[in-house]
Image (cartoon, rainbow, N blue to C red):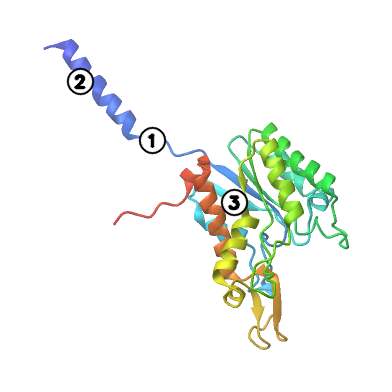
Amino acid sequence: MNHPRLLRIFSLLGLTAMLAFTPPPAKITVYLIGDSTMSIKQMKSYPETGWGMPFVYFFDESVTVDNRAMNGRSTRTFIEEKRWQPVADNLHEGDYVLIQFGHNDEVPTKKSYTTEAEFRANLIRFITESRDKKATPVLITPVARRQFDAAGKIQDTHAVYANLVRNVATEYKTPFIDLNKQSQELLQTVGVENSKLLFLQLAPGEHPNYPEGKEDNTHFNELGARKMAELVLANIKSLQLDLANRIVKPESK
């Protein structure tokens, strides 16, 4: 018997078996931190839907999406209410933190108001503390409101604070999703009237949660939330984040 040849055959068989077995990817958590446009809604608010709700269904079983976004919060109040610290404490290598604030930071009349300098500092804190744990922060500009001028042109209601996010992302070389710009483009394409179909717009008596109706140009219904989540997903792919490899793949037939 040719022992060297036999050994080579067994070695090749062993190598083939090792290559055929691919260990499952390590489990990771994707944390969502932000405001009401991203958050999980209570049943009493339905059909209001944060875009973080449909977002959870885009990924395979190796990903847990932990949506910590909360209605009415700014970067400052999110930190002051100790909502950020548990996220920072529980981050692990390979995790992601998707960061979308601005709606409540930018309004001087709100208790959640955050100055431009504070807003910038808070974003930097989210980035640095995520990276300290070897997690990946992703900065996202605030999603657009449905506000058109008389000529039917979408208005940028987040210009100042969205630009702060852009600048911090550039300075700190952070993955960046310009949801403000892209959602404006979507609303402009859909148009003044049809864009109502993406928001919490209800006629009186149309839904038991809103017997008097609702005309909300900030918060989404199920369709609008899914459309915004799809924009975020498309950016995860175009940024070529490792997270894109964990998107659900259609089963072959």
Q: CA distance from mark 2 to mark 1?
A: 22 Å
Residue at image mark 1: 22
User: Which residue occupies 58% across, 75% down?
Assistant: 197
- 163 lies left or right of 106: left
Indicate which disc, 3 or 1, sits on the residue closer to the N terminus: 1
Quarter of the image with the C terminus is bottom left
Residue at image mark 2: 9
Q: CA distance from mark 3 to mark 2?
A: 45 Å
In terms of secondary structure, where does tag 1 sit? loop
- Counting from the top left corner in percent of width and height, residue 229 is at 57, 58
- Counting from the top left corner in percent of width and height, residue 154 is at 65, 67
Q: Is residue 77 visible?
A: yes
In terms of secondary structure, where does tag 2 sit? helix
Task: Name the residue type under label 2.
Answer: Ile
In terms of secondary structure, where does tag 3 sit? strand
- Counting from the top left corner in percent of width and height, residue 214 is at 70, 80
Q: In the image, which disc is placed on residue 65?
A: 3
Task: Name the residue type under label 3.
Answer: Val
Label 2 close to label 1 by CB (< 8 Å) = no
Q: In the image, which disc is placed on residue 202?
A: none
